[in-house]
Image (cartoon, rainbow, N blue to C red):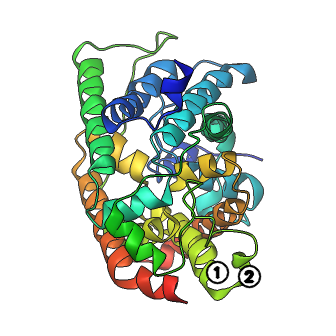
């Protein structure tokens, strides 16, 4: 398939970082992301972030656990991003690090509320869905496929929705 | 050591480790932390259907799919090798409330009483798994990110739209968990 110059722009409609790398990598360079994912998944399970029960506690203000996790994660993230920018730290391949800003649109309000509804029902955001399947609860595959369907419908309706 | 690792990890260990994912991905390849985008890449690679939103070179974002495959593997390891033999300990007030809906099994991180293959074909299961999952997928993409992309990555980079999104996630969650979910669990 032929992708025109608009490709970067199109991918940038996402929250995803779309920094173009000039380096061509073989597929096995992606294994490092698998490893980060594995560590992340283990933390998810062991801290019970992927527990439906912990999410219910959070939304009923019955436990500090989730607030502590998200709060301390943001603090560490803030400090890391500040250090990277302050000292112009480069990637392991020597490329400069840049983070694309997030533009405001009303989708963050409408979509945010809709995702909040789903989060409280399923007790999971997208990351925990993958980890929950890994823990052996195979029925969550259905929840994940349904989330893919939701994403697809958003793409289908995108131009008609208020943003 | 292994016994120690098998205990549930406290927030002050897990939170900072999750936060370190942000610099890890940036340093490894200038990638911004975000998970819900993987759902979009799955659509773009499998069912693009000529929809403009899915017409892009998803192969350039394939690292994200490797990352979520890792999360799944991490779930297998966390639940297999490092599994906590004890039931999930929850706030007694929550346990009381959930017992009223017949939820008493705390052996798994997911409530097996209501989320299983049999209940999938009941009205309650339909709402919990299919409608719930659908709202997660639709809402995260509409908002342009989820807890990782907005609440953690966006706030780490001081992006105010991410703060708006994160607050709306919480408002939606509070409304659902306290006002609507009780009716679904009573079905």
Q: Is residue A101 visible?
A: no
Q: CA distance from mark 2 to mark 1?
A: 6 Å
- Residue nearest the observer in this picture, B3 or B154: B3
| Residue of label 1 | B126
- Residue nearest the observer in this picture, B118 or B27: B118
The x and y percentages for residue A151 are 58, 65
Q: Earlier in the sequence, mark 2 or mark 1?
A: 2
| Residue of label 2 | B121
Q: Residue at x 31, y 71 (%)?
A: B174
User: How many numbered callouts?
Assistant: 2
- Residue nearest the observer in this picture, B148 or B123: B123
Dot 2 alpha-carbon crowd within 10 angstroms: few under 14, some 14 to 19, many 20 or more: few
Please tell me in which quadrant of the rendered image residue B79 appears: top right
Please determine whether, in this image, residue B141 is positioned above or below residue B78. Answer: below
Q: Residue at x 66, y 42 (%)?
A: B72
The x and y percentages for residue A155 are 57, 67
Q: Are marks 2 and 1 in contact (CB under 8 Å)?
A: yes
Q: Residue at x 67, y 51 (%)?
A: A133
Side of B14 relative to A24 (left or right): left
Q: Quadrant of the C terminus of chain B?
A: bottom right
């Amino acid at each position: 398939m032929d992708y025109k110059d608009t490709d970067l722009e199109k991918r940038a409609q996402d929250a995803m970082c779309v920094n173009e790398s000039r380096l061509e990598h073989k597929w096995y360079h992606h294994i490092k992301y698998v490893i980060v994912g594995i560590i992340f998944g283990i933390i998810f399970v062991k801290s019970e972030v992927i527990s439906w029960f912990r999410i219910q506690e959070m939304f009923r203000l019955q436990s500090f656990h989730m607030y502590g996790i998200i709060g301390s994660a943001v603090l560490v993230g803030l400090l890391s991003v500040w250090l990277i920018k302050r000292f112009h730290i480069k990637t392991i391949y020597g490329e400069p690090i840049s983070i694309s800003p997030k533009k405001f649109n009303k989708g963050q309000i409408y979509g945010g509320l809709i995702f909040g509804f789903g989060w409280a029902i399923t007790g999971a955001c997208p990351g925990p869905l993958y980890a929950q399947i890994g823990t052996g609860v195979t029925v969550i595959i259905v929840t994940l496929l349904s989330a893919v369907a939701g994403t697809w419908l958003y793409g289908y309706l995108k131009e008609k929705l208020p943003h | 050591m292994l016994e120690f690792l098998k205990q549930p990890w406290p927030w002050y260990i897990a939170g900072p480790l999750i936060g370190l994912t942000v610099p890890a991905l940036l340093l490894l390849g200038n990638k911004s932390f975000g998970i819900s985008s993987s759902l979009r890449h799955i659509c773009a690679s499998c069912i693009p259907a000529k929809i403009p939103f899915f017409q892009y070179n998803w192969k350039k974002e394939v690292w994200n799919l490797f990352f979520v495959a890792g999360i799944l593997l991490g779930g297998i390891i966390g639940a297999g090798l490092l599994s906590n033999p004890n039931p999930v300990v929850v706030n007694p007030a929550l346990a009381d409330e959930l017992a009223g809906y017949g939820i008493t099994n705390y052996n798994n991180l997911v409530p097996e009483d209501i989320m299983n293959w049999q209940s999938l074909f009941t009205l309650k299961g339909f709402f919990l798994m299919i409608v719930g999952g659908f709202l997660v997928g639709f809402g995260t993409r509409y908002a342009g990110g989820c807890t990782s992309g907005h609440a953690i990555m966006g706030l780490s980079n001081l992006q105010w739209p991410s703060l708006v999104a994160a607050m709306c996630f919480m408002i939606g969650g509070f409304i659902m968990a306290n006002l609507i979910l009780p009716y679904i669990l009573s079905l």
